[in-house]
């Protein structure tokens, strides 16, 4: 069967791209490996819920407070004003998105990407159906690679796709405490900045309704992520909770310089490297990346110009480049040592930091309307970095 577009990967990015393309009348196939659940805290901002029409049934918890915890166990609670952060369980959320794409007209294929071959103007994607040993060919005009941080499509087709930096994320989905618990609040996300848990990133305890995600990430080789997560569960008083499943995967933290091969392939989501530095947030940016990839593919199909595939990265970076740049600076500045992490959590006590951070998170735009607040934050950053301000 000939397709206009084959989307490789059925996570939030690939499913969004497949749905958008199918709704616009294109013949689309979505190839996904069944059964894989990505380790993810599951937080989604109100803008995602609104922009992508996420139903209430997918929201397993509503978070009203974020707690930052430092190496010395300093705790700073930040109330989320004028809204909430939604939590989803990737096991069900991703399948919801795939089913929605299928309902829109995308053909679902279950199997593993093998390779791409070309004969003149004809592009053929080969995949191995689940349970089969032989690869099957599919002809297509375009391919969207949305197959994760270690994307086979990116490595084969896009310059730099084989060298993208990443952290390893690991979490355990546990049964949430049912009785009142001294350390656990089903309406609060805990973010742990402690080198004993992660020497270069952070740990987390995120409620998922009847369940919770407990995990951490690190880009340093040799870090025992399972032991660190076990230590985090002990520190959080959750070691006795039932473990439902364990998951680990690489999480990219730097967008690729190029997302297309100049011919018939464009990347989206983790394959393009669009997980936010510092926060590690990926679901929103994956879905936006999938939408922009679909827009670029549609433009290319209409015009016949391969350069239109560049629109995916251009649109994304125009809207989010500055946010990624600021978050990268934050990570490089504050995650270097426990002393820096201690000072970062102290800085989070500041009301200007809290308001500007969550306004930016909820709406996915840097807040430019409060110049004096930005100046005060800059002065406090300098004060902490020069140790003129005490760490707690």
Image: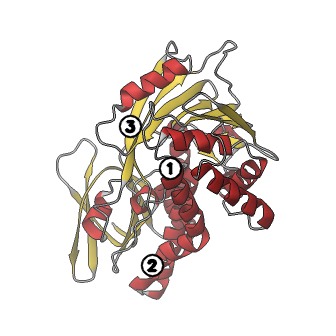
Q: CA distance from mark 1 to mark 3?
A: 21 Å
> Which residue position holds label 1?
98
245 or 264, which is in the foreground? 245
Q: Is residue 180 above or below residue 330?
A: above
N-term-proximal mark, 1 vs 3: 1
* Residue 138, image x, y percentages: 29, 64
Please give the label number shown on residue 310.
Answer: 2
Badges 2 and 1: C-beta atoms under 8 Å apart? no
The residue lying furthest to the front in this view is 388
Q: CA distance from mark 2 to mark 1?
A: 25 Å
Please give the label number shown on residue 342.
Answer: none
> Which residue position holds label 3?
248
The answer to whether residue 85 is left or right of residue 14 is right
The answer to whether residue 261 is left or right of residue 64 is left
Residue 183: quarter of image: top right
Provide the secondary structure element on which disc 1 rests.
helix
Between marks 2 and 1 in the image, the one whose residue lies nearer the viewer = 2
N-term-proximal mark, 2 vs 1: 1
370 or 53, which is in the foreground? 370
In the rendered image, the quadrant that contains the N terminus is: bottom left
Residue 310: quarter of image: bottom left
Q: Is residue 341 above or below residue 178?
A: below
- Look at 55% across and 68% down and name the residue there: 321
* Residue 49, image x, y percentages: 68, 51
């Amino acid at each position: 069967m000939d397709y206009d577009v084959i989307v490789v990967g059925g996570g939030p990015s690939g499913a969004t791209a497949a749905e958008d393309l199918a709704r616009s009348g294109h013949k689309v196939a979505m190839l996904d490996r069944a059964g894989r659940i990505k380790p993810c805290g599951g937080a989604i901002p109100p803008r995602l819920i609104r922009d992508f029409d996420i139903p209430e049934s997918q929201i397993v918890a509503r978070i009203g407070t974020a707690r930052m915890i430092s190496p010395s166990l300093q705790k700073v609670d930040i109330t989320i004003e004028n809204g909430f952060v939604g939590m989803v369980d990737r096991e069900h959320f991703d399948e919801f998105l795939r089913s929605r794409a299928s309902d829109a007209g995308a053909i679902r294929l279950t199997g593993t990407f093998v390779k791409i071959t070309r004969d003149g103007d004809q592009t053929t994607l080969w995949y191995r159906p689940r349970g089969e040993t032989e690869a099957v060919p599919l002809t297509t005009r375009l391919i969207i690679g949305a197959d994760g941080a270690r994307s086979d499509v990116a490595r084969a087709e896009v310059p730099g796709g084989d060298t993208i930096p990443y952290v390893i994320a690991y979490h355990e989905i546990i049964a949430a405490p049912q009785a009142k618990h001294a350390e656990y609040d089903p309406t609060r996300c805990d973010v742990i900045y402690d080198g004993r848990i992660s020497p270069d990133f952070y740990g987390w305890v995120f409620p998922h309704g009847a369940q919770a995600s407990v995990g951490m990430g690190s880009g340093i080789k040799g870090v025992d992520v399972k032991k660190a997560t076990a230590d985090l569960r002990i520190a959080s008083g959750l070691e006795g909770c039932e473990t439902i499943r364990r998951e680990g995967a690489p999480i990219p933290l730097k967008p690729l310089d190029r997302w297309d091969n100049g011919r018939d392939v464009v990347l989206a989501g983790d394959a393009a490297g669009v997980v936010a530095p510092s926060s590690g947030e990926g679901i929103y940016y994956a879905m936006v990346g999938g939408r922009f990839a679909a827009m670029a593919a549609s433009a290319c199909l209409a015009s016949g110009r391969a350069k239109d595939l560049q629109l995916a990265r251009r649109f994304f970076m125009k809207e989010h480049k500055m946010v990624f740049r600021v978050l990268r600076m934050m990570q490089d500045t504050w995650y270097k040592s426990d002393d820096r992490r201690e000072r970062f959590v102290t800085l989070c006590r500041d009301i200007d930091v809290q308001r500007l951070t969550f306004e930016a998170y909820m709406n996915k735009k840097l807040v430019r309307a409060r110049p004096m607040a930005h100046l005060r934050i800059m002065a406090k950053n300098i004060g902490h970095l020069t140790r003129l301000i005490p760490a707690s």
